[in-house]
Image (cartoon, grey):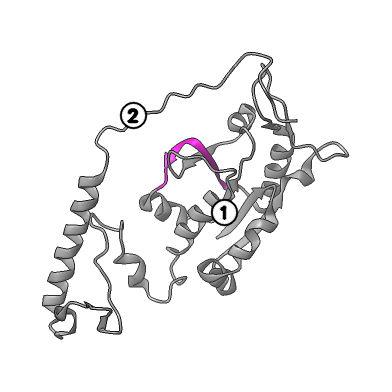
């Protein structure tokens, strides 16, 4: 997989990319990551990538010109990318989507900042919009790392044991079962005897039952009808804006 990440802060995410699963995948040749600072595609000497929103309002909006130029430059050099826009409007990310993305030959993430994107950035390309959930981050970089790692670890050969990806939470209908390792007893808490019994069928049954219990607890705790919060943004002129 070749991955391009469009960001204003490449140095912030490079250390994470070079460690653990993502670092291993790159060393294996299963992943190549291009960190693209789209400020380098700005048109003016000050390398401006944002501006005040038309119609007034708080904050700044990412301009279309640098992002269009960056995406077009990448696709001229490497071919078409599956393009992911990380934003609140998107579909909530899950394991099924991670598996779909893991099959991509080329993947591009656009990491937003400030008050968001000029709408023409959405209109100008075929994006898949993805959200991590109903909360706010300062930018899309952390979200890109989450989505990328979840997808890359499903590429065949990246994990040392293929079953690690096949038998974990969210790959089926149940959560993963509880895991234990040495020591057998720790501070008065003992690992279940069944796991040391040597009876593989009994262990499998115990794990399945525990997975069902954990899944039922999670479903019981989930909100049945979450209500959206009401916090409309000001639209008139004269509102406080970032300098």
Which residue does the image show at 59% across and 63% down from the upper left? 17
Image quarter in which the C terminus is found: top right
Q: CA distance from mark 1 to mark 2?
A: 37 Å
10 Å neighbourhood of mark 1: few (<14), some, or many (≥20)?
many
In this rendering, the answer to whether 196 lies above or below 5 is below
Which residue does the image show at 66% across and 19% down from the upper left? 239
- Most foreground residue, 57 or 99: 57
> What are the residue bounds of the magenta stretch?
82-93
Give the residue pinned by disc 1.
106
Q: Residue furthest front?
A: 187
Which residue does the image show at 27% across and 72% down from the upper left? 179
Instruction: Using residue 93 as the reference point, say whether residue 136 is left or right of it.
Output: right
Quarter of the figure with residue 208:
bottom left
Instruction: Using residue 49 as the reference point, say whether residue 115 is left or right of it.
Output: left
Quarter of the figure with residue 154:
bottom left
**Is residue 194 within the magenta segment?**
no
Give the residue pinned by disc 2.
227
Q: Secondary structure at mark 2?
A: loop
- Secondary structure character of the magenta stretch overall: strand
Can residue 104 be seen? no
10 Å neighbourhood of mark 2: few (<14), some, or many (≥20)?
few
In this rendering, the answer to whether 191 lies above or below 79 is below
Query: Reading the chain from its start, which is encountered first: label 1 or label 2?
Result: 1
**Is residue 83 within the magenta segment?**
yes
């Amino acid at each position: 997989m070749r991955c391009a990440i469009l960001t204003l802060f490449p140095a912030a995410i490079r250390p994470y990319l070079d460690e653990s699963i993502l670092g291993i995948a790159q060393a294996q040749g299963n992943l190549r990551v291009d960190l693209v600072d789209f400020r380098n595609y700005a048109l003016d000497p000050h390398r401006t990538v944002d501006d005040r929103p038309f119609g007034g309002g708080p904050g700044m909006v990412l301009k279309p010109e640098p992002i269009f130029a960056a995406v077009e430059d990448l696709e001229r050099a490497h071919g078409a990318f599956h393009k992911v826009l990380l934003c609140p409007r998107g579909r909530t990310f899950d394991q099924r989507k991670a598996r779909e993305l893991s099959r991509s030959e080329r993947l591009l993430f656009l990491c937003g900042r400030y008050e968001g994107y000029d709408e023409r950035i959405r209109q100008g390309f075929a994006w898949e919009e993805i959200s991590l959930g109903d909360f706010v981050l300062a930018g899309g970089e952390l979200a890109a790392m989450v989505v990328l790692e979840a997808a890359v670890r499903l590429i065949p050969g990246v994990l040392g044991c293929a079953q690690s990806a096949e038998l974990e939470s969210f790959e089926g209908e149940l959560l993963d079962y509880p895991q234990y390792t040495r020591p057998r007893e720790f501070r008065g808490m003992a690992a279940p005897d069944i796991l040391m019994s040597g009876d593989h069928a009994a262990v499998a049954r115990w794990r399945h039952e525990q997975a069902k219990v954990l899944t039922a607890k999670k479903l019981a705790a989930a909100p049945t009808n979450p209500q959206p919060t009401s916090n409309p943004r000001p639209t008139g002129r004269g509102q406080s804006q970032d300098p």
